[in-house]
């Protein structure tokens, strides 16, 4: 709201090539907020579902939910309808805001829901068909939104949920992570300062709202009056042209985007001079990707961010240093760096006791960004948010293996705890196998999996490689010369493109399924 | 090997799309008009489109460089086939050491082939 007043005529977001000013976005958000408040008695849950993506309505809906004093629950029209329905029902939301592009999926959501719902459609004027189709629900069209003057400022509650974000659960049922206002405030304030974001910045908006990294996109930019720039469907094919055409100054994506862009010949020296800041998060950042990106964006700082949803977007970061960083990296992967202010990192063994400096273990963290746990799921909350022996505070178990720094060095990421497997009785870090194959093949997209499962672990290792290989025999020799026999992959699968999940990360489960199908 | 014509590229693209449709248990395309937009029609998403491009390059034993191409036209069948054909012809005429990073990782890639057993 402060930015809306200070930068009212500047663009808050560019959608489909059209700028939406801070003033216009504020008006839309206030009208949505006032409409939610007007129906509070009938549909009075603390959460509002946002079924929208990369549209003025999507951003207005996120802000409108928060301005109404509710948290938002993002839903994604590209997800299978059954999953979206499950997330919607589990959230308990009785209010749903939908943009035009998501309307075709609305049937799947409403047909199966017997509750009485408030459905706000700010992109539509005529909702007669919808009212006939679902007479039990209340529909609000663009023209029927309350005036912005009707909005009443809600009581501030830093412990209230800002957003509820569903992540995949190991049992197949998505877990809703409850992230509070105080968690987000700590993150946004720190990042806006750290990156010195100003109203002159133009930032990418690459993440779907169902990926929590989108919270950085929106709120760090808007905190300082910067402009958020959404790529069109077509621009996603050539992100390099998107950076150049829009003169982006801040870039944020998963590291896999660099690998894909390199495959298409889009990462060449000095191509992205407008970028002053590039951030990568969500999966390991290969050293070669970081180096190639910095050559393409020579005026840019590059940071590798790390953080599970439960610790609010990102909670450690590492700024790449051309002279030092290669040596500080491990397994060919950039370090994850240092904990954010107030965040505490503890590296522990299987008994949750802190390991010595230089040793590897699971990363536990706590601090102002630690979320409230899982929505209506005390059992899973208690198993992930624990008090280690000899300590009094609750820590979140990340499930990530890191090396405890020696002295003031950075944390290095070694993979997930479940990426450490037993092969024929030997303990093997799959990350080490991936590092060797990456180096030998010159390709960043490499995944190693234990396969097939056996009583004591796995029978061997299978490796998937993205892109091209000119000399497979030579690669085989190189790998065999650097790894002991039990770590040498039994199968090498070369694919044009490794499967990605909806967030753009490499989908290990899909690769494992392929091995199962080939059996 | 001679460079593919736009029609050669179209035949490969149609085959790729039909394989995708078969995976989704959908019927094949009977006609692929010049103005058909592969992305906006919903036939491919952006990642599947990238996969198709890399598969096309591999099929014709050449690495495609899409830096200069306007994504607005890239996803439309006619301009895409002409562009790919021209790129492969140009690159076949250039010495390998001019190809830069893309050339370094090029080679005969098998599409999800299993090797080294």
Image (spheres, rainbow, N blue to C red):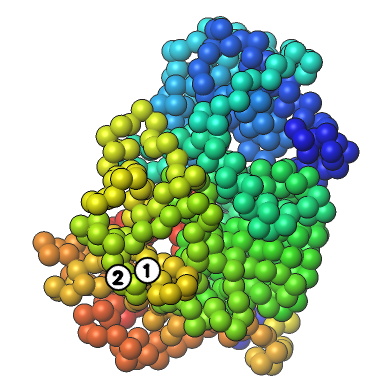
Query: Which residue in the structure is indicated by mark 1?
Result: A404
The C terminus of chain A, quarter of image: bottom left
Do the residues at discs 1 and 2 belong to one chain? yes
Identify the residue at image location x=84%, y=38%.
A6
Discs 1, 2 touching: Cβ within 8 Å = yes
Q: Residue furthest right?
A: A9
The answer for which chain carries disc 1 is A
Image location of residue A376, percent across then percent down:
36, 28
Q: Is tag 1's residue or tag 2's residue first in the polypeptide sequence? A: 2
- Report helix, strand or loop for mark 1: loop
Q: Residues within 10 Å of mark 2 (few under 14, many from 20)?
A: some
Q: Residue furthest left?
A: A455
Q: Residues within 10 Å of mark 1 (few under 14, many from 20)?
A: many
Quarter of the rendering containing residue B91 = bottom right
Quarter of the rendering containing residue A419 = bottom left
Q: Is residue A323 visible?
A: yes
Image location of residue A28, percent across then percent down:
75, 26
- Report helix, strand or loop for mark 2: loop
| Cα–Cα span, label 1 and label 2 | 7 Å
Residue B28 versus residue A138 in the image, above or below: below
Query: Which residue in the structure is indicated by mark 2?
Result: A356
């Amino acid at each position: 709201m402060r930015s809306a007043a200070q930068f009212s005529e500047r663009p808050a977001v560019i959608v489909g090539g059209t700028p939406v000013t801070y003033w216009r976005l504020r008006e839309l958000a206030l009208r949505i907020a006032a409409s939610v408040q007007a129906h509070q008695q009938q549909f009075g849950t603390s959460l509002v579902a946002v079924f929208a993506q990369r549209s003025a309505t999507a951003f207005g809906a996120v802000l409108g939910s928060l301005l109404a004093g509710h948290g938002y629950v993002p839903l994604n029209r590209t997800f299978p309808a059954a999953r979206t329905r499950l997330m919607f029902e589990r959230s308990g939301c009785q209010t749903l805001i939908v943009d035009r592009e998501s309307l075709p999926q609305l049937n799947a959501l409403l047909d199966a829901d017997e509750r009485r719902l408030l459905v706000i459609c700010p992109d539509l004027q005529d909702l007669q068909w919808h009212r006939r189709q679902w007479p039990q629900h209340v529909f609000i069209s663009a023209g029927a939104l309350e005036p912005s003057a009707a909005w009443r400022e809600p009581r501030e509650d830093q412990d209230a949920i800002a957003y509820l974000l569903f992540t995949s659960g190991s049992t197949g049922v998505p877990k809703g992570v409850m992230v509070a206002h105080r968690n987000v405030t700590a993150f946004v304030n720190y990042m806006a300062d750290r990156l010195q974001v100003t109203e002159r910045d133009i930032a990418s908006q690459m993440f779907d709202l169902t990926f929590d990294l989108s919270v950085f996109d929106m709120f760090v930019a808007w905190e300082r009056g910067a402009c958020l720039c959404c790529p069109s469907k077509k621009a996603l094919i050539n992100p390099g042209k998107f950076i150049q055409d829009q003169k982006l100054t801040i870039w944020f994506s998963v590291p896999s985007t660099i690998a894909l862009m390199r495959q298409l010949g889009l990462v060449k020296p000095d191509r992205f001079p407008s970028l002053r800041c590039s951030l990568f998060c969500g999966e390991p950042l290969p050293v070669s990707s970081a180096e190639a990106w910095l050559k393409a964006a020579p005026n840019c700082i590059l940071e590798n961010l790390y953080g599970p949803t439960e610790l609010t977007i990102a909670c450690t970061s590492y700024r790449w240093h051309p002279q030092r960083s290669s040596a500080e990296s491990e397994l060919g992967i950039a370090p994850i760096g240092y904990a954010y202010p107030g965040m505490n990192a503890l590296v522990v063994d299987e008994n949750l006791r802190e390991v010595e400096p230089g040793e590897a273990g699971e990363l536990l963290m706590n601090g102002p960004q630690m979320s409230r746990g899982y929505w209506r799921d005390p059992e899973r909350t208690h198993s992930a948010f624990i008090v280690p022996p000899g300590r009094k505070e609750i820590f979140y178990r990340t499930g990530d293996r890191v090396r405890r720094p020696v002295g003031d060095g950075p944390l290095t990421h070694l993979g997930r705890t479940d990426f450490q497997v037993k092969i024929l009785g030997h303990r093997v870090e799959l990350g080490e196998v991936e590092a060797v194959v990456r180096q030998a093949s010159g390709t960043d997209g490499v995944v190693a999996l234990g396969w097939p499962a056996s009583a004591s672990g796995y029978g061997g290792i299978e490796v998937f490689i993205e892109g091209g290989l000119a000399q497979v025999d030579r690669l085989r020799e190189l790998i065999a010369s650097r790894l002991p026999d039990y770590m040498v992959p039994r199968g090498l699968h070369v694919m044009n493109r490794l499967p990605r999940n909806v967030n753009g990360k490499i989908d290990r489960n899909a690769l494992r399924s392929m091995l199962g199908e080939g059996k | 090997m001679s460079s593919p014509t736009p029609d050669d590229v179209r035949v490969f693209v149609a085959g790729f799309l039909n394989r995708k449709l078969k995976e989704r248990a959908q019927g094949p395309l009977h006609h692929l008009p010049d103005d058909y937009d592969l992305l906006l029609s919903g036939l491919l998403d952006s990642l599947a489109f990238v996969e198709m491009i890399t598969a096309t390059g591999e099929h014709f034993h050449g690495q495609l460089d899409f830096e200069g191409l306007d994504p607005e036209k890239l996803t439309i069948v006619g301009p895409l086939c002409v562009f790919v054909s021209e790129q492969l012809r140009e690159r076949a005429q250039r010495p390998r050491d001019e190809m830069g990073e893309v050339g370094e990782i090029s080679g005969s890639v098998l599409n999800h082939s299993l090797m080294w057993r």
